[in-house]
Amino acid sequence: MIDLDRMRRDSGIIGNSDTIEEVLETIIQVAPVDISILIIGESGTGKEMVAKAIHKQSRRSSEPLVTVNCGAIPEGIMESELFGHKKGAFTGAAEDRKGYFEEAHGGTVFLDEIGEMPIETQVKLLRVLESGEFMRVGDAKTRRADVRMIAATNKNLVEESSKGKFRKDLFYRLRTVTVDVPPLRHRLEDLDLLAERFALLFSRSNDIIFRGFSSDAIRVMKQYDWPGNVRELRNFVESVILLEKGNKISSEIVMKHLEPLVGGSGSSPNLPVLVDKSSGQAERELILQQLLFLRQDMREIKDVLSGGQIDRSGEIGYINTGGGLNLKAIEGDVGNLIKSGAIGDMRVKDLEKELISRTLKKFNQNRRKTARALGISERTLYRKINDYGLERRQKNSDNKKNME
Ligand SMILES: Nc1ncnc2c1ncn2[C@@H]1O[C@H](COP(=O)(O)OP(=O)(O)O)[C@@H](O)[C@H]1O
Ligand SMILES: [Mg+2]
């Protein structure tokens, strides 16, 4: 068995977050076993890297890895691409031709974007998965291929199968081992490392001087939600370095280049804090957001106490209206939460401290879950825990490695 660090080196997969470590550990576990794997995750999260790493660590590593982008192959020729065809099987089939499965014999087939596979082809795929058998288009001869199948998708296959677009039997068969690659915005603690590494690689191979990112620049990058994930980050870093040749990358530079990505004018839902980047405003939003959570909690408690059902239908602008806060909703309602008599004596800090402490308690001091529930990064949570002296004597060792 190889260790995490070696897996990182061999695969090139960058990241120290718990979720990436889980991914790496899963690769280590499943790679040597000859089973099919389903990799799920948004576009640009590194699914293809995972597939390559699995192949590389498997006993099949000296045999071919054939990558098929199912989304790029026209439906009509999918079957012949995968399984080959016999001469004359259709107009234009001038020769007998091997498909990808035969080419991959002994190795691995990586079916990228498997959610795009036409439903008729899915039946044939299931057959290969179960028995290794297939037929070339227009040929009656049953052939066998010894291949391992790795599939990836950014679609929700449960939804696809309930819509009748993906066969349930194939889905059940594929999902036995599922590797879930998390979006970048859920592992922002990896962003520094990724950005630095991409910057170094790019500047070195293009002979550009790179003077580093300021810590504020990184902070601003962490406020964007990176819908295109690591791929988008990589492109972003490369273009910034190219356009800002020789400059240290400051937060102003980052903002200048992020602004167009989020729609320019500043009211982007993806970049709430970037717009009002004063940290005072950011804190204010955070607290308002938390008040809203508290209010919802209280309503649920009341409902439970009164024996009623929890009714979410009237829930006000459930916080994440795409990143920004629904201030109107809050300003209308929050007043009810705090007793009027307390106004004047209460400090924002006290509220925040109590909120963090109780959220930590609710999640058994699990900082990742707490940060997520609070809508802040783990790093910010750590800072606040320190600032408020909420540090538990007995630290959760899992969380230690993420501390600054
Ligand atoms: N954890 C990671 N470490 C290093 N590079 C990554 C990582 N995740 C993604 N990348 C890079 O991002 C880009 C997209 O990755 P890819 O595997 O093609 O994503 P997906 O298949 O999920 O769309 C590639 O350039 C890849 O090198
Ligand atoms: Mg891909």
Image: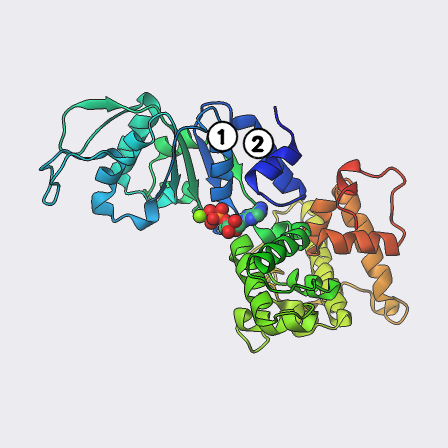
In this view of the protein, which residue sits in the foreground, 172 or 129?
Answer: 129
Residue 300's x, y, as percent?
68, 50
Say above or below: 283 vs 133: below
- Where residue 290 appears, x then y in whole percent? 73, 59
Residue 244 screen position, x and y as percent: 61, 71
**Residue 354 seen in this snapshot:** no
Q: For the residue labelled by badge 2, is the local secondary structure a helix, a strand or a loop? A: helix
Residue 20's quadrant in the figure? top right
Which of the numbered marks, if any, corresponds to residue 177?
A: 1
User: Could you tell me if the residues under marks 1 and 2 are in contact, i.e. CB atoms within 8 Å?
Assistant: yes
- Horizontal arrangement in the rendering, residue 90 relative to residue 112 (left or right): left
In which image quadrant can residue 15 be found? Answer: top right
> Residue beneath label 2, please?
26
- Foreground pick, 35 / 372: 35
Nearest to viewer (mark 1 / mark 2): 2
Q: Does residue 170 appear in the picture of this structure?
A: yes
